[in-house]
Image (tube, helix red, strand yellow):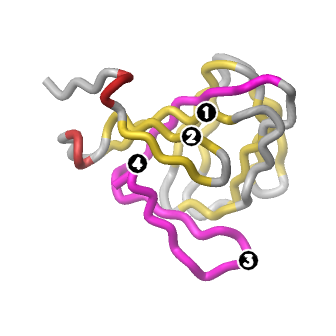
Amino acid sequence: MLLTKPEDAEEFTVHGVLFRSYSRSATGAATLGAWQAAFPPNTPGVPHHMSVEEVFHVLSGRVQVEIGVERAELLPGDAVTIPAGSRFRVSNETEEPATAWIVTPLGMNFTIEGTTNTVNPPWAQ
């Protein structure tokens, strides 16, 4: 059984967002990465382009999501699928924290808009 308890999840912070990794190669996963993201109040999103499809499910709070030119506010229980290659941004424009559960295929990477640098986030490898 590949079990990761909250206290065992490895943590990474990028652009003010805390990522808690639950499923990745280092925990024994073969194909899927899954993590929880915690967005502090008033956290602006950083536009980036995903290499693979991603599922983003809001657990608490409210976040504003942009995919291409579309924008939506997501509430707890809402989920959105981000197509591979799309421009994607998540912001928390509220005074309350927000959390989300995210799943991608392992090996996911992204490019921050306006750069040529590919980021291989450790929580998704």
In this rendering, is residue 47 above or below 11?
A: below
The three-letter amino acid code for the residue at tag 2 is Leu
**Mark 3 to mark 2 CA distance (whole Å):** 23 Å
Of the numbered discs in the image, which one, if any, rests on residue 123?
4
**Mark 2 to mark 1 CA distance (whole Å):** 5 Å
Q: Quadrant of the C terminus?
A: bottom left
User: SS of the residue at dot 3?
Assistant: loop
Which one is nearer the viewer's eye here, 117 or 41? 41
Q: Are marks 2 and 1 in contact (CB under 8 Å)?
A: yes
Residue 73: x and y in percent read: 82, 31
Sort mark 3 into few (<14), some (14-19) or many (20+) by Cα contacts within 10 Å. Answer: few
Q: Report the residue marked by disc 2.
A: 18
Q: Residue at x 48, y 47 (%)?
A: 12
Q: Residue at x 68, y 35 (%)?
A: 39
Q: Is 88 on the left or on the right of 19, as rendered? A: right
**Mark 3 to mark 4 CA distance (whole Å):** 23 Å
Location of residue 85 (image quadrant): bottom right
In this rendering, is residue 100 above or below 45?
A: above
Of the numbered discs in the image, which one, if any, rests on residue 38?
1
Sort mark 1 into few (<14), some (14-19) or many (20+) by Cα contacts within 10 Å. Answer: many
Numbered range of the magenta stretch: 96-125
**Mark 1 to mark 3 CA distance (whole Å):** 25 Å
Q: Residue at x 48, y 57 (%)?
A: 52
